[in-house]
Image (spheres, helix red, strand yellow):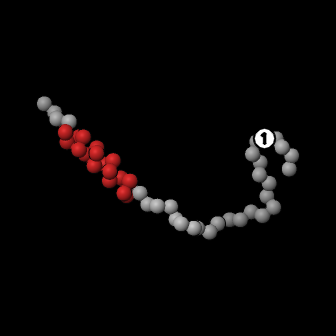
Amino acid sequence: MFSLRPFVFASALAVLAFPALAQPAPANTPYDIVIENGHVIDGTGSPW
């Protein structure tokens, strides 16, 4: 009969290991594109 112990062990190992592989977000990156004097259209219907 199949034992669940190896599956549980592998699942626990994956849950603990995968967050360690995630890369943190860059601390302070400059903007790629700056749009000056633009209008934000957010769907509320308010006039500009």
Dot 1 falls on a residue whose secondary structure is loop
Residue pointed to by mark 1: 44
Q: Position of residue 2 (x, y in %)?
A: 16, 33
**In the drawing, does residue 6 fall left or right of residue 17?**
left
Residue type indicated by callout 1: Thr
Residue depicted at 37% across the width and 58% down the height: 21
- The residue located at (79%, 58%) in the rendering is 38
| Left or right of 3, for residue 39 | right
Q: Outermost residue, top direction?
A: 1
Total marks drawn?
A: 1
What is the x, y in percent for residue 12?
A: 28, 45
**Residue plotted at (78% across, 64% down):** 36
Tell me what residue is drawn at x 68 percent, y 65 percent: 33
Q: Is residue 22 above or below residue 12?
A: below
- The quarter of the picture where the N terminus appears is top left
Q: Is residue 47 above or below residue 31?
A: above
In the image, taking residue 20 as reference, residue 39 lies left or right, namely right
Residue 48 percent across, percent down from the top left: 86, 50
Picture quarter containing residue 43? top right
